[in-house]
Amino acid sequence: MKKNLEIEFLHREEIDCKRWNATIDNAFNGSIYAYSWYLDVVSPNWGALATNDYSYLFPLPIKRKYGINYIVQPLHCQQLGLFSTNHISANIVDLFIDQIPAKFKYVDLNLNIHNKTNKHTGHINKRKTYMLDLLNYNEQVFRNYNQNTKRNIFKAIANEFTLTTTLNPGDFMKFYRQYGFMVNRKKDVIVIEKLIESLLTHNKANIAGVTDRNNKLCAVALFAESHNALHYLLGSAEPENKKKGAMFYLMDGVIKNHCGMDKVLDFEGSMILSIARFFSGFGAKPCTYFNYHRNSLPAGEALVSIKQKLKLI
């Protein structure tokens, strides 16, 4: 462990975005989620822990309500944690976790797959994402699809679906507003629209759709691409066409278009069995990352009241 690391807490306005993003660009574990412009959308009040030379960066998705400071993992941002151009040991991860200011009374933060911990095991939960190496499509990818996935793709072909990878953002949002999953509909729409705009501005977006024989949109998906990884952020299908294999057809088409390019597809989860089954049907393998959880809110009824206000339960 580097004992001489000087770690500083930075508010958003104190962060040098040029230096920050240069580190994320060159980090061995760099990720789309860690760019300043991405965090600005999914967690506008984020801060960070960082070394003076910006060689180690630890973004903190900060929120504040009712006078309480807390940290929670934002939507559309599966993994954060420590990013660096240098080696990351478990001891260094522990050092950064120790530096999370005590004023944050509640912390629920996902680390990334390259972050391990020796010290904080009592506050760690295991999470899974599903990842697929996009190798040769015919010889190494399609042959590893399970029978259910292949059957649904053939069903979709019989229904004469067509894949489009140049879907208009407006058409995507119109469809997703109707069929997509939303926690807080109005707020989620605004965030997703801003996220798409930002991804397109930085040339990191891949918006795909499936149409039927009448050119009617049946399914959509949004992917973000960075560091040789394609991240599945959002997707939805019209219920009847979902039964006809539209989502299987969409995913297979995107996989096929990116195979043989030294990339991986990160399906982003899931802990939900049915969704995990869908991902694993494409031959994706589970990969573990850690969630760090710390709660120093008041105990008893006060805790329940605060959690309800903060929408933590």
Image: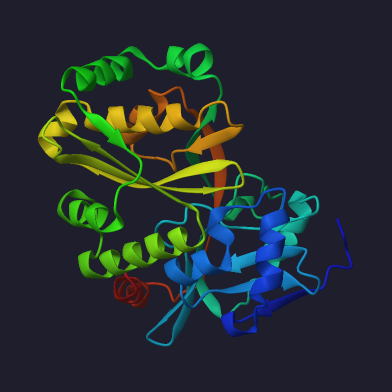
Which residue is at the front of the view, 249 or 124?
249
Q: Residue at x 35, y 71 (%)?
A: 307
Whether residue 312 is visible to the viewer of this picture, yes or no, is no
Q: Residue at x 60, y 82 (%)?
A: 11
The residue furthest bottom is 67
- Quadrant where the C terminus sits is bottom left
Q: Height in image: 231 above or below 71? A: above
Whether residue 125 is visible to the viewer of this picture, yes or no, is yes
Q: Quadrant of residue 35?
A: bottom right
| Rendering coords of residue 204 (x, y %) | 50, 53
Q: Height in image: 122 above or below 150? A: below
Q: Residue at x 60, y 67 (%)?
A: 59
Q: Quadrant of residue 1?
A: bottom right
Q: Height in image: 189 above or below 303? A: above
Colouring of the image: rainbow
| Rendering coords of residue 227 (x, y %) | 61, 47
Q: Residue at x 32, y 16 (%)?
A: 150
Which residue is at the front of the view, 19 or 188?
19
| Rendering coords of residue 126 (x, y %) | 52, 43
On screen, residue 164 versus residue 238, left or right, reads: right
Which residue is at the front of the view, 162 or 146?
162
On screen, residue 254 versus residue 79, left or right, reads: left
Count the numbered circles shown: 0
Q: Height in image: 104 above or below 111? A: below
